[in-house]
Image (spheres, rainbow, N blue to C red):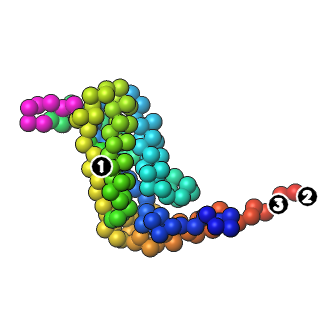
Amino acid sequence: MREGRVVLSHQQEKKTVPMIDVYATRGTFADPKTLARTLAATLMKIEQVPDIPMFRQNTAAFVHDLPDLALSNVEGDSTYVRVQVLTNAGALDRDKQLAVVQQFTDLVAAAAGDASLSGRTWVLLTEAVDGGWGLAGHANTNAELIAAARAQIAELQQPKPSTGT
C-alpha cells in the first residue's frame, strides 16, 4: 500500500481467480458449504490476493458428493478425498504449494471429523494456461484479470459521494 492506495505487487499480478473441487463419498462432510467457504478463504490468504469483491466472489470451492460405489482404490477402500486446486500458471511458488497442500489436508480432515483422513487426502495442484481461464463468458488472459483487479481497486478507492443535505 502506498499513499493510501492498494497497489498490486509483482507477485500479486500473477494471481487470478482459483477454483477448488473436493471429491468425497456422500456423507463425508457434515457441513460441505462451510468447508467450501473455508477452503476458498484459505486459498485467498495463501495466494495473498487483494481482498476485493472480484476475488471474494470468484474464488470458489465445489464439494462433490460421490455415491459410495463411485470411488475405490485397488483394495476396494473408498474412504479417500481428492481436492483439485486450479490456478493460473505460476500463481503458487513452492512455499505456497506446500502451504495449500498442508492446510487443505488439515481442513478436510477436520471437516470430516476424522484425523486419519489426512493420510487419505490427495491434493492436486493444477495450472491453467494464459487465456485458459473463463470468467463471465470470456476466456481471460492473466493481463486482463490483472487489469480488472486494478480497475476494481481504483473504483473502491474513489471517495463516496456525500449524501448530506
Please state which of residues 111 and 10 is positioned toward the viewer in this rendering. 10
Of callouts 1 and 2, which one flags the residue occurring earlier in the amino acid sequence? 1
Task: State the image quarter where residue 133 is shown.
Answer: bottom left
Kind of element beneath mark 2: loop
- Rounded to the nearest angstrom, the CA distance separating label 2 from label 3 is 9 Å
- Rounded to the nearest angstrom, the CA distance separating label 1 from label 2 is 53 Å
Q: Which residue is mark 3?
A: 162
Of callouts 1 and 3, which one flags the residue occurring earlier in the amino acid sequence? 1
Kind of element beneath mark 3: loop
Circle 1 or circle 3, nearest the eye: 1
Q: Which residue is mark 1?
A: 84
Q: Residue at x 24, y 34 (%)?
A: 119
- Rounded to the nearest angstrom, the CA distance separating label 1 from label 3 is 46 Å
Q: Quadrant of the C terminus?
A: bottom right
- Give, as a single range, the part of the protein colored magenta: 73-80
Q: Quadrant of the N terminus?
A: bottom right
Above or below, 104 against 97 in this view is: above
Res 94 visible: yes
Checking the image for residue 151, the label placed there is none
Where does the image place residue 155, in percent across and percent down from the top left? 64, 66
Above or below, 102 against 127 in this view is: above
Question: Callout 1: few (<14), some (14-19), or many (20+) C-alpha neighbours within 10 Å?
Answer: some
Question: Callout 3: few (<14), some (14-19), or many (20+) C-alpha neighbours within 10 Å?
Answer: few
Seen from this angle, which residue lies furthest right?
165
